[in-house]
Image (cartoon, rainbow, N blue to C red):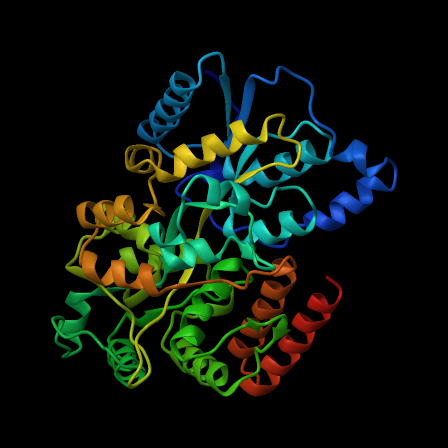
Amino acid sequence: MTRSVTPRPGADAVRGRRPRPVRGAVSVWAAVLALCAAAALSGCLAQGAGDRNTLRVWVVEAPTPQISGGYTALADDFERRHPGVRVELTEIPYQLYRDKLMLAVQGGTGPDVMVLDQIWTPEFAAAGLIEALDRDIRAAGMRGGDFFAGAWASNRWRDRSWGVPFNVGVWERMYYNADLFRRAGLDPDRPPRTWKQWLAAAGRVDRLPDASGVGLIGCRDEAASVLTDSLLYSAGGRVVSDGRAVFDSPANRRAFTLYQRLSRHAPSGAASACSDDTLAHFTAGRTGMLLDGGWQQPAIEESARFDWRVTTPPAPEGRAFTGALGGWNMAVGTGARDRELAFGFVRLATTSPTHQTAANDSVPALRAAGEAFVRKNHRHPGELLRMLAEGRPRPVVPVYNAVSRAQQDAVQAILGGADVAGALAEAEKAMQRAIDQE
């Protein structure tokens, strides 16, 4: 196996940050069209030069030496199973990954196997940059039921599978400050379960001196889309259904009305608050409740100096909280020099419990490995496993970035005091325009 690691950007750009889904990037399809204006499409997608017995695999740079070692063990195991094959493993920092991948694929030097953010998968499929894998999946005897359902669904576009889930995460979990709950006269052993109780608890904590009731992500960022997705999913809403934007619905109005009301109990400047900001405010002991992903638990354990708990967020009366999913998929590039060999690597990486565990710091998407991982590493594992099992992917559309930007525009308007119905109607029009131009 050979390994290369792309140098990181400046330390200030990455210190303390978890990878987040891309925001505002140029679509792959638009980039391909621009490049192909000057060259034939066959040239754009030409196979890269090199030995057919060398398998090129691109992954996001491991966050720890242990996970990097998991990548190495995976590559070494594949080489043992395929004598004469050499795995060329390239780790690239998240901040650089998408741009470098786009340039390489467009120039005909892309990898045989790549990891893709869930929200990129249909975009790469529509652009003709990755292979449909249905035939390979059937031949390998792989089943969608062996994976978390929402993670599997994130690869399904136009009734075909374009990847296999590698890992999965769910927005949101609710972290809360038990000390502030006690000071506000709330029982920390009975956190709010309904939206009505949530608003009441946020108001009581907010009345404490030097405290805010709830931390809400509201900045113009993908995290704001995912947070509000979890609210509208819990209310029974959707963003896109059967190729149509359905953002302005009664369920979504109810969810965004709650969001607007909760924002009155958030620290000032909610419209510019990103995940790092709300996390810092919470770990400093100044926020009663925080909505964020389960992967924030280690950061809170390290920084919080107070009694804190984690639970499933509240839901509307009579409904269960339904989270929005994120994570990474593994795909085979259309320029792969040996498709069978490339899919073999995908299969090993996604169906081996050993490699799923060793090469992941997020929840493995393979259910058996993921359930063991959650039980070992998370508080209240049963709650998180239910959320992973019932969570929904974000809209599986090639124009997801445009859809998300419209949603973020609605968030900004609503936090600015705009009428909820009007903001959702405007966003729905923008989403549909993007879908119609797909």
Q: Residue at x 54, y 78 (%)?
A: 414
Visible residue check, residue 269: no
Quarter of the view holding residue 426: bottom right
How many marks do you count on the picture?
Answer: 0
Pick the quarter of the image with the C terminus.
Answer: bottom right
Q: Is residue 194 above or below residue 129?
A: below
Which residue is at the front of the view, 247 or 50?
Answer: 50
Residue 325 locus on image (x, y percent): 42, 59
Residue at the extreme right: 38
Which quarter of the figure is the N terminus placed in? Answer: top left
> Relative to 198, is 301 above or below?
above
- Relative to 101, 388 lies left or right: left
Tell me where residue 299 appears, x and y as whole percent. 29, 47
Residue 408 spot, x, y in % from top left: 57, 67
Q: Position of residue 213 (x, y in %)?
A: 30, 73
Q: Is residue 100 left or right of residue 354?
A: right
Q: Which quadrant of the figure has residue 191?
A: bottom left
246 and 411: which is toward the camera: 246
- Extreme residue in the top direction: 84
Residue 280 visible somewhere in the drawing: yes
At 36% from the left and 39% from the top, the residue drawn is 351
Q: Residue at x 47, y 50 (%)?
A: 20
